[in-house]
Amino acid sequence: MSTSNKIILVVTAILFVLIVGFGIKAALQSSNQSVSVAPSTASSTLPGLQTGNAPWIAEIDHLKERLADIGLPALAEEGTVLHIHQHLDIFIHGKSVPVAAGIGINELAGFISPIHVHDDTGIIHVESPTIQTYTLGQFFDIWGVAFSANSIGGYTNDASSTLQVYVNGSKFNGDPRTLALAAHQEIVITYGTAEEQPVIPSSFDFPAGY
C-alpha cells in the first residue's frame, strides 16, 4: 500500500471516530433535555415536618420552604388548567383521623399550593396552572406530615400494626408516595392491627360541580 493510501485511510478513520463521537454526544444532550428529574429531597428532611401522633395540624409556617424543596410553586391564586378532586380518609387503630382544613394555604402570606384543602371534609383540591401528575407523597409533604411506605406521622410498621393504602376500595401495592392523584378518587389510609381494620369505602359522594 502506498504512503498516500495509508494517509487517506488514517484520515478516514479519524473522521469516522469524530462523526460517531459527535453523534453520541448530540443524542445524549437531546435525551437530557427531554428528561424531567424530580426533586431529590427526602420527605424526612423537610422543614416543619410533623413526626408525632395524630391529629396533625395544617402546618403553614414552613409551607413555602417545603414547596421550594419539592419543586412546587407558591401560587398567588388557584390554578385553572388542571382542576380535579380526591377524597382522603385516614384511620389510625380503627379510629378516623381528621384531614386538617387549610392544608397548603397561607392566607396571611398570600399564597396557595397547587394541592390544597379548604375545609374539614377530607376533599383534596388539585388546582394547577399546568397539566402534570401530582402524587399522594407531595400532598403529605405540603401538609407537613411524615409519610412513607411504612409510616405516617409517628406511626411505623411493627410486628402487629401496619400501614395500608386503598384507592376506590382496592389495596394499593407499592410505595404510596408514588400514588398519582386522579379525579374523584376515594383514598383510604389505615394504620393498625388486622382486628382494627375498618370497613374500606370504595367511593365518595362529591358535591355537585366537583
Image: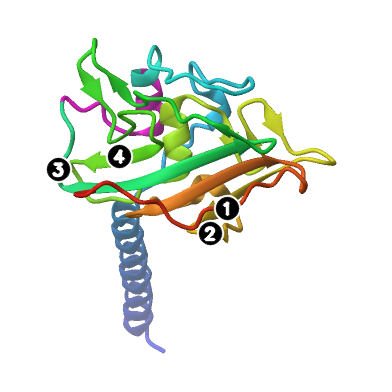
Q: Dot 4 corresponds to which residue?
A: 125
Q: Position of residue 195 (x, y in %)?
A: 77, 46
| Marks 4,2: beta carbons within 8 A | no
Mark 4 element type: strand
Residue 80 - label: 3
Q: Dot 2 corresponds to which residue?
A: 169
Q: Is residue 72 magenta?
A: yes
Q: How dense is the environment of label 2, judged by Cα within 10 Å: few (below 14), some, or many (20 and up)?
A: some
Q: Dot 1 corresponds to which residue?
A: 200
Q: CA distance from mark 4 to mark 2?
A: 20 Å
Q: CA distance from mark 3 to mark 4?
A: 11 Å
Instruction: Please determine whether, in this image, residue 30 is positioned above or below residue 88.
Output: below
Q: CA distance from mark 2 to mark 3?
A: 29 Å
Task: Check the image and name the residue furthest to the bottom.
Answer: 1
| Marks 1,3: beta carbons within 8 A | no
Q: Which residues are magenta?
A: 65-76
Residue 208 - label: none
Front-most of 60 and 186?
186
Q: Nearer the viewer, mark 4 or mark 1?
A: 1
Q: Is residue 38 magenta?
A: no
Mark 3 element type: loop
